[in-house]
Image: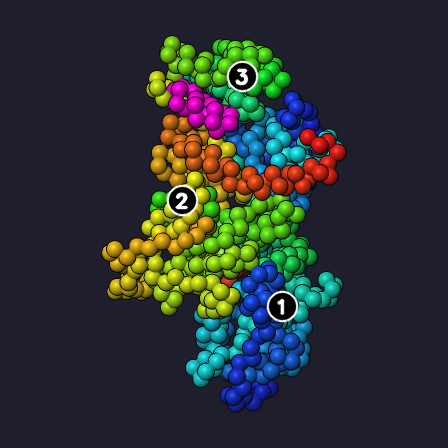
Amino acid sequence: MPPVSEPEGLAPERRRPSRAPRTPMPERDAAERARVFAEVGLGYTEEMARAEAERCLQCRVPTCIEGCPVNIDIKSFISRIIEGDYRAGVEILKERNALPAVCGRVCPQEEQCEASCVLTKKGESVAIGRLERWLGDLDLACELEHRCVPQAGPDSGRRVAIVGSGPAGLACAGELRRFGHAVTVFESLHATGGVLTYGIPEFRLPKSIVASEVGLLEEMGVEFETDVVIGATYTLDDLLGEEGYDAVFIGSGAGLPVFMRIPGENLNGVYSANEFLTRVNLMRAYDFPKADTPVWRGRKVAVVGGGNVAMDSARTALRLGAEDVFLVYRRTEDEMPARREEVHHAREEGVQFEMLCSPAEIIGHDGWVTGLSVSRMELGEPDATGRRAPMCVLGSEFVIDCDTVIMAIGTRANPLLGQTTPGLELTKRGYIATDETGATSKPGVFAGGDIVTGSATVILAMGAGKRAARAIDEWLFSDAKKLPRR
Amino acid sequence: MFPIVHARQLSDAVFEVGVQAPAIARKVHAGQFLILRVAEGGERIPLTFSDWSAEQGWIRFIFMRVGKTTHQLSHLGVGDSLADVVGPLGVPTHTQGAGRVAVVGGGVGAAVAYPVARALCDAGAEVTVILGARNAELLILEDAFRALPLKGLVICTDDGSAGEKGLVTAPLRRMCEAREIDRSMAIGPAIMMKFCAATTRESGVPCTVSLNPIMVDGTGMCGACRVSIGGETKFGCVDGPDFDGHLVDFEELMSRQRVYSDLEREADADFSRGCVCHP
């Protein structure tokens, strides 16, 4: 179905700026939710969605669309909500985004579409993310045969392999199916979804939603093969050679967790955020011993970092029963890269913020963590990233009493594909080098998402996956490939 | 699902299982490992390949029944299947230009020592194998080793019920002192590898060890398998599992291996109560 656009002359009258305040989304009570894994945001009701949609000005030049990394026709889908034609709204979303229920939850809309909403200047933007989520959930709640499944294109006779079933791979897969290519997604873990499954916690993104969205791609004809590590089970050259794929997209994700290289980091009770979240989310360690994977449930937990992953870790630790959870960050709350909403939720649930603190050493006894020694920091001049650089205050060290430390300070590139793929050019930092379309130095191999950019967001990875899908489609029928269109 | 095509009990608590996994079997090299999940809800555990056939498409591993997962695994037979098997993971053992090598396999570590010794023989090395076990009953794979073109096979048991009475470090020390070996490989319990490293260090003979830290994903993503090598943190799954034994912080490794022992005992006790075998 083509994007819905209004015929000339029939555009509704310019709407008057709404005086109604932004419709809040109901949330589970902070005290109640801080101990359970059930989702925090409860979503709009139909009434709320209609009221919020009514706030949209339906601008002639909708700047919100430019603010969206995948350019969803936001104006039109909101217009369909106003009209009550929800199915058409879902179709508009899915034109551009294979995972609306996911993105409606985890996209940083306040920096993207909502930041460019005209109403932002006059107060509060339209809650575009909430509306996207509401439509996405509406679709998910339908029986499969009634769901909006984007149509796969006529069979092109071409086969594309995708490495990784996270946001980049899923977006790329959906798009390639629309073009009619056969798509197989290889996933190294036993479950699909990548970071949506192992990283983002249930209380922020229920796993049933990820599974349903992935199920829809299966419905479109995308094949998933779990338990396959590309670079180990098959090399990239195997895929392009004897496995018979015409092109490959690499969306293998962020990779290896970074540690601070301070004393005590290998004590028992020190986790990378990746390990901690994987144990709890993917392996369901919160359900031990019913689920077989254990996790150390700290009484006093220090989480180091200021991003969304740090917030997820801190809030997960609370839900595992911690009495105190400290968020240790070397700058101030203003410099935190985490979404405001996540910071707000973490604070509301009782995470204690220790700002302007930089860990110097993890202290232990008998092999186990007993404390985190930190130095007070003060902010100096802005550094290369524009953020004010923290500087250590001499003699300011103090110890945070804790039995668990979770390092959430980022990741570096996983070297596996680079090491096992001759001719695949990497950047200085070990990420895969691509042009703006996602093409790598190796013919027929494209890449996108965190393995190209380093840690970023779900939607940016999805945008990269979609862009690469278009480039792959072109490449498959280009002179370079020298294959006739079947 | 990965069908089980071979299952046999090697000793009281040691079992060998083979599964059909053609894609993996084509790629395995000695020293690499796999990660498996027995069933939905199960944990991911790493086990080193003990044997494989690229032609017939199967892989095998040997494990000791120590917790719930290995307990469940020990009850499976031909016709059953495993939910997940992924691999081959880790860097293969370096076998080229090996010269005269002693390969030490302690306990269930013999299962890993076997393909390593075989690969070294294939690469033209002069290989002496030292097998250690608590007693004759726990000794595994002796016949398989005897079928290899080894320079020698020395068997040690703690109680003298087979071969020499004593620890594997005694023959290892003799070989080092007599300058009969250029390097060594030790695979077994951390405490055994620690003492093999100490023994070889005295005479300056290199000693590679195959470490078995706790893992979750096995591809570098989680960092559970951190080990200290010469004061630097490495990941057992992607930087290893083989490391220079003279640089390994074994105390830290052993401490980290015990992180979940209380929880694991609880899970196994829970499982055993409902289990017919009551081990």
Q: Is residue A243 left or right of residue B199?
A: right
> Callout 1, which amino acid?
Gly
Position of A125 relative to A483 (above/below): below
> Mark 3 and mark 1, same subunit?
no
Q: Is residue A88 above or below residue A252?
A: below
Q: Chain of mark 2?
A: A
Label 1 chain ID: A
Question: Which comes before the other along the chain, label 1 or label 2?
Answer: 1
For the point 69% across and 25% down, the residue is B8
Q: Is residue B231 visible?
A: yes
Q: Residue A364 has which mark? A: 2
Q: Position of residue A76 (x, y in %)?
A: 58, 77
The question of residue B240 being in magenta is answered with no
Q: Dot 2 surroundings within 10 Å: few (below 14), some, or many (20 or more)? A: many
Q: Residue at x 58, y 42 (%)?
A: B263
Residue at disc 2, secondary structure = strand
The region drawn magenta spans B183-200
Disc 3 versus disc 1: distance between alpha carbons? 65 Å
Residue denoted by label 1 = A136
